[in-house]
């Protein structure tokens, strides 16, 4: 019976990885929350499809007795687990001093699901290759939808001011960034950055024709990532890839037999960048020269203003913050204007949970980093730990420039999955 439950949990986990970034929301009614009074429309309480499948995986794993729980009872993994539980408890306690109790309660429920999913991945023996393939399949779906979104634009009239659709500009001309099935190009870009790093793990672990097909899939993800026009995703893909290569080398996995496929997909990636730069040069130039486009200038100004507001909120409530998911509420009430989240996760955590939450978050980072240092010193980095470590570095870079890893299930579940995978004692399972 337990083995069946475990297989069912694995299946639900794989489905979660496929649909993790999808924008499919089921409304949730909360007695203490007036949905019409939330600062941003997408803050209305909902449950994502991926959270539902993750809950199924968590529930069946619990019924099966939560196998391999012992891995979290010693060393830095124990420190991580205790810090995570403490962070969830402190964040839930912040409901008490939150201006909108219902909104804080909903976000606390999200955090509980993400934390449980991370611990599930850390303990469960769901094969790494299957998880990577499930994630790759989901990203290929996003990519193909994104290519269609690019192709149909000559026949679709988009008014950026009114539609809320994210676009890039070339003077009066504009081009929609690809969303795939996700809620925003930056989110899709972050997923694709993680995908191009993890797919390298699949390329290394496979051979012959399967490896060639994986290189084609890697190229598709890379091209789709370019078309998101997400600067944070580009930085994450580059920084995370460098980290993954360093970890692979430290773990002695960069053998001569891998030189040819690495050179091949690197060359494909470079050619794709050159073609992309040539085809979209005016849009690309305006993406970096933000002073040339009023919309880009306004976006940067709003981000700086949001960061200043978050600092003011932290200064006024340094110990416990203003409460989970409350920074946008407090900023709106103070200024009378609705602003988006500050695009920096450490600053956002400090504003919402104060020093208490920041210390607990620091403990989580310290524990994960300590595990990496132990592996580095012992040169015990397994083949899958290297790309997973690179993917985590990519997410750390994203956290400095965006907020969705802390505020949205698409980001929270992605981070939970990678962290749980990193905590595993061994990633050498090949299938």
Image (spheres, helix red, strand yellow):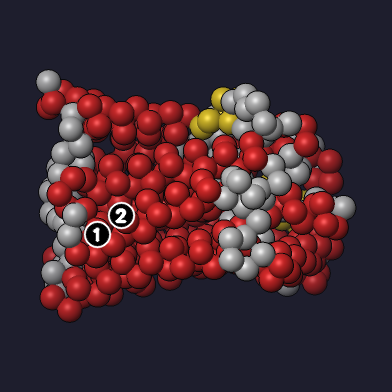
> Which residue is pictured at 31% across the width and 59% down the height?
80
Residue positioned 37% across, 51% down in the render: 85
Location of the C terminus by quadrant is top left
389 and 290: which is toward the camera: 389
Name the spot of residue 317 as percent of width and height, x first. Answer: 67, 64
- 2 over 425 or under it: above or below: above
Mark seen at residue 81: 2
Q: Residues within 10 Å of mark 2 (few under 14, many from 20)?
A: many
Hey, which quadrant is residue 135 in on the image? Answer: top left
In depth, the one of 93 and 415 nearer the eye is 93
Question: Gap in Å between the C-alphas at discs 1 and 2?
Answer: 6 Å
User: From this viewpoint, is residue 204 visible?
Assistant: no
Position above or below: 230 against 206: below
At mark 2, the secondary structure is helix
Residue 243 point in image, percent of width and height: 34, 71
Q: Are marks 1 and 2 in contact (CB under 8 Å)?
A: yes
Coordinates of residue 16 in the picture (x, y in percent): 38, 34
Residue 41 visible? The answer is yes
Residue 77 is marked as 1
């Amino acid at each position: 019976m337990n083995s069946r439950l475990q297989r069912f949990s694995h299946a639900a986990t794989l489905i979660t990885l496929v649909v993790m970034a999808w924008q499919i929301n089921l409304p949730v009614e909360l007695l203490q929350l007036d949905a019409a009074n939330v600062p941003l429309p997408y803050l209305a309480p909902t449950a994502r499809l991926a959270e539902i499948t993750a809950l199924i995986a968590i529930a069946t794993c619990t019924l099966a007795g939560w196998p391999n729980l012992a891995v979290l009872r010693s060393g830095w993994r124990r420190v991580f687990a205790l810090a995570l539980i403490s962070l969830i408890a402190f964040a839930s306690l912040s409901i008490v001093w939150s201006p909108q109790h219902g909104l804080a309660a909903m976000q606390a429920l999200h955090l509980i699901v993400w934390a449980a999913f991370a611990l599930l991945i850390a303990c469960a023996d769901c094969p790494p290759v299957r998880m990577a393939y499930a994630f790759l399949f989901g990203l290929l779906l996003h990519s193909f939808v994104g290519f269609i979104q690019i192709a149909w634009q000559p026949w679709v009239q988009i008014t950026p001011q009114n539609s809320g659709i994210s676009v890039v500009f070339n003077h009066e001309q504009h081009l929609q960034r690809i969303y795939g099935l996700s809620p925003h190009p930056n989110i899709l870009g972050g997923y694709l950055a993680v995908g191009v790093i993890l797919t390298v793990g699949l390329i290394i672990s496979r051979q012959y024709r399967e490896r060639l097909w994986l290189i084609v899939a890697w190229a598709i993800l890379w091209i789709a990532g370019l078309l998101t026009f997400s600067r944070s995703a580009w930085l994450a893909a580059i920084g995370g890839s460098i980290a993954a290569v360093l970890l692979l080398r430290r773990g002695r996995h960069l053998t001569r037999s891998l030189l040819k496929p690495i050179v091949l997909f690197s060359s494909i990636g470079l050619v794709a960048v050159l073609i992309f730069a040539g085809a979209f040069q005016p849009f690309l130039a305006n993406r970096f020269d933000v002073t040339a486009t009023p919309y880009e200038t306004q976006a940067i100004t709003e981000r700086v203003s949001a960061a200043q507001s978050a600092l003011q909120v932290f200064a006024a409530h340094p110990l416990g913050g203003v409460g989970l998911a409350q920074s946008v509420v407090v900023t709106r009430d103070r200024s009378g204007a609705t602003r988006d989240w500050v695009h920096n996760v450490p600053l956002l955590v400090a504003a919402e949970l104060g020093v208490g939450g920041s210390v607990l978050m620091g403990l989580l980072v310290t524990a994960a980093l300590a595990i990496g240092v132990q592996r580095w010193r012992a040169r015990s980095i397994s083949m899958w730990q290297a790309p997973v470590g690179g993917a985590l570095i990519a997410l750390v870079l994203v956290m400095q420039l965006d907020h969705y890893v802390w505020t949205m299930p698409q980001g929270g579940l992605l981070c939970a999955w990678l962290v749980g995978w990193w905590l595993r004692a061994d990633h050498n399972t090949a299938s």
